[in-house]
Image (cartoon, helix red, strand yellow):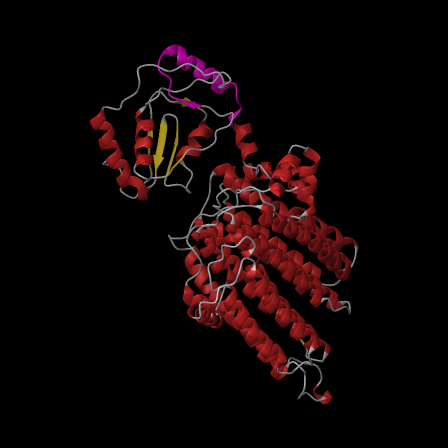
Amino acid sequence: MAAAPAGARVALVDPHFVGHRHSLRLALTDPRFAAGAVTGALSVQAQARGALTRALHEADSAGSGAAPEASGPGPDDEGAVTAPPRTLPDAVADALEAGDVAVHRPELGPLFAAAPVGEEARTAARTAVDGVDDEAVRLRNAVKSRDGFFTTFCVSPYSRYIARWCARRGLTPNQVTTASLVTALIAAGCAATGTRGGFVAAGVLLIASFVLDATDGQLARYDLQYSTLGAWLDATFDRAKEYAYYAGLALGATRGGDDVWALALGAMVLQTVRHVVDFSFNEANHDAVANTSPTAALSTRLDDVGWTVWLRRMIVLPIGERWALIAVLTACTTPRITLVVLLVGCALAACYTTAGRVLRSLTRKAHRTDRAARALADLADSGPLAEGFAALARRAHLRLPGYGPPAVAFLGTAALLATALWTPLGSVWPCVAALAYALTSGFAVAAPLRGPLDWLAPPVFRTAEYVLVLVLAARAEQSGVNGALPAAFGLVAAVAYHHYDTVYRIRGGTGAPPHWLVRATGGHEGRALVVALAAALWASGAGRGPEQGPGPTGFTIALTTLAVVVAAVVLIESIRFWVSSKAPAVHDETGEPA
């Protein structure tokens, strides 16, 4: 072991090991874990080599060799042959865990791994290995155990074989992910043509893109090709593909004389807020104690009724069902019908999921940890203004009661959006409301967000910022400001990327983006104030005579400039982080529909 290169991954395998090749692959080659083990085999990456050396010395001093004989199968082992209690790799793995090194022990299911002693035990072990098709299990495990109806029954039955075909030809998940993105962008381009043939081609290509999207994850699981870059691509490209397609639909409709940019932006806003609701709720309850409620108990009971499981997964309109719906409607109808149906479906799904989570939160008696409160504070994306008001509230010892934080956040949001909707365009009132919104936002996050409904604060903030941009841009377009809605679409897309990037960093355990980045982009309340100021100065369309014709005005330029600045700052920092060695290999293995 001392002769092995210091930066290399090393493995210890008992000479009597008998098992499936894929059981060894799961334990010895998964790059996501510092150490992995199955019975009779252990693998350690470079960062845990020091701990391995110490564990080997301890095992050598204790004389921890292999046990003299194998134990017989237990009553629940279904004929499996168990390993000796202490092979050397097993002893070292136990020592690593005792030394606070997390050792990943993969679920083998029907796969077999043992280190039997004695010819009779080895014969029984080989018989057990021969009784299970290793490749069939590997293919089956390439598919998420929990996925949407459309993905499970209409895509995965054949996409897993595409994943195997890719693996055998040396293709990587990142290459398949990139191919999926390129296919979706071509689909968006076809939709932007505004022709029936273009819409049909767009629908077909969108489905092809989704098949490739399913394939990249299955390839990663099939061949255990996980990487930090792949995590970043997987985490962001789904949204980039979908939102680019919305823009393509809007461009295509414009070519046909129908302006649906407001609908496209509304679809992006609704979908992003839905995801923030999911992320915020899950982070708030990530490590909650006594994480039970009558609503959760009812959900568990419904899981025993098979058809209700699929019905509930379809109701939430996950990515497979959503993209299939968009593809069919694009090919058969118009962009306006496609976006209206999508908005109605996503709104119903949002109401269903949010209501269920609110009920769970109200009926659950759980203590939320400091980690959950920190994650919610990071998801809030509070800038200098909100932080300043929060500091004032703490100095004044102002503490909101139980449901105070989400209630105050909701009141500030309602006042802001009502002002943007119903006060004269170009007036100063939206700016006043944006300052009040910054004040209420600061009060909402002044104390740690540990209340039962405090997880609602981040999605309320996202609603306020995104919908404010949508409302002011739509009103500006109506007043004659050309290009305000496309510019608003770009701005919301840039900010949404920042929020998705924050989510996946938190999921990886590395915390939110650096504080300077949040300050540089202004925070949600700072950007809301900038947009309100720009609307007060330029959104009324004044200053352009009819002889000048249609064209971008100050408000469009302001939104575009803000979008470019936010996108540049966020993308540079995000790319730097995700290609660095500190970035986690975060892949969605939960099966939660996106």
* Residue 517 placement (x, y as % from top left): 44, 66
Magenta stretch: includes residue 236: no
- Residue at left offset 70%, top offset 60%: 191
Magenta stretch: includes residue 121: yes
Compared with 279, 308 (above or below) is above
Q: Quadrant of residue 23?
A: top left
Compared across the picture, whether 233 is left or right of 91 comes to right
- Asked whether 183 or 317 is in front, the reply is 317
Boundaries of the magenta span: 113-134
- Residue at left offset 42%, top offset 58%: 577
- Residue at left offset 49%, top offset 45%: 172
* Residue 192 placement (x, y as % from top left): 69, 63
- How many marks the image carries: the answer is 0
From this viewpoint, is residue 491 visible?
yes
Compared across the picture, whether 47 is left or right of 328 comes to left
- Residue at left offset 20%, top offset 27%: 61
* Residue 41 placement (x, y as % from top left): 36, 28
* Residue 261 placement (x, y as % from top left): 69, 67
From this viewpoint, is residue 493 visible?
no
